[in-house]
């Protein structure tokens, strides 16, 4: 897991050409981008844009992916993302290849990432994460998740 800001993300382009393409694309968009899927490089790199209100962490679930790395960028608002090592997690719903997702039971301990507007989290397959959690209260969030195929 890497936590940085989009403004300071250029050094992470060394993680590979697909990550670099996703980061460059993120730096080129503005807050008026429409919700939904946006193609960057077919199914190898694409973005999912969503606007939502954060909620209590008890209403969210831990997830992880096997095929894609997540570049989770908060364009507006703030939220907490809870994080724990996937290897130490108990699977609640087995991996579904069609959605590239596995759901986990709540672990006894997790780290908390405070994501403010402009922050970027890079989450790899071994990073179980629970996004969309309240950060001191409910907030309207504009989130762009760039999915980068490994």
Image (tube, rainbow, N blue to C red):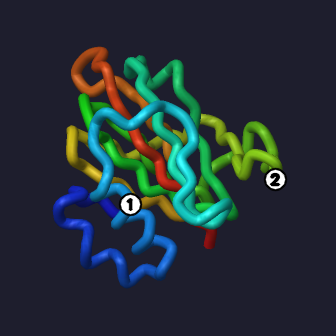
Question: Cα distance, mark 2 to mark 1?
Answer: 26 Å
Write the residue at 42% across / 26% down: 51
Residue 116 image position (x, y, % from top left): 21, 39
Q: Residues within 10 Å of mark 2 (few under 14, many from 20)?
A: few
Q: Is residue 102 above or below residue 76?
A: below
Write the residue at 81% across / 45% down: 94
Number of the label disc, if any, that sits on residue 25: 1
Write the residue at 42% across / 30% down: 132
The quarter of the picture where residue 137 lies is top left
Q: Is residue 6 above or below residue 19?
A: above
**Could you say whether the residue bearing mark 2 is in a helix, strand or loop?**
loop
Number of the label disc, if any, that sits on residue 97: 2
Residue 8 image position (x, y, % from top left): 18, 66
Mark positioned earlier in the residue sequence (2 or 1): 1
Q: Is residue 119 left or right of residue 124?
A: left
Q: Is residue 32 left or right of residue 50?
A: left
**Could you say whether the residue bearing mark 1 is in a helix, strand or loop?**
helix
Residue 121 image position (x, y, % from top left): 36, 55
Residue 49 image position (x, y, % from top left): 47, 38
Nearer to me, 70 or 28: 28
Residue 38 seen in this snapshot? yes
Nearer to me, 110 or 71: 71
Residue 128 seen in this snapshot? no
Number of the label disc, if any, that sits on residue 138: none
Q: Is residue 8 above or below residue 15?
A: above
Write the residue at 50% across / 46% down: 129
**The C terminus lies in quadrant:** bottom right
Nearer to me, 8 or 84: 8
């Amino acid at each position: 897991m890497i936590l940085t800001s989009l403004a300071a993300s250029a050094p992470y382009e060394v993680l590979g050409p697909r990550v670099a393409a996703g980061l460059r694309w993120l730096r080129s968009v503005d807050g008026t981008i429409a919700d939904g899927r946006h193609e960057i490089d077919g199914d190898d790199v694409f973005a999912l844009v969503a606007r939502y209100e954060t909620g209590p962490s008890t209403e969210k679930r831990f997830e992880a992916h096997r095929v894609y790395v997540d570049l989770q960028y908060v364009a507006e608002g703030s939220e907490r993302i809870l994080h724990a090592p996937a290897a130490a997690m108990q699977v609640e719903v087995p991996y579904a290849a069609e959605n590239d997702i596995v759901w986990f039971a709540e672990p006894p301990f997790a780290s908390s990432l405070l994501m403010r507007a402009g922050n970027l989290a890079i989450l790899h397959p071994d990073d179980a994460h629970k996004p969309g959690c309240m950060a001191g209260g409910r907030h309207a969030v504009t989130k762009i998740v760039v999915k980068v195929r490994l």
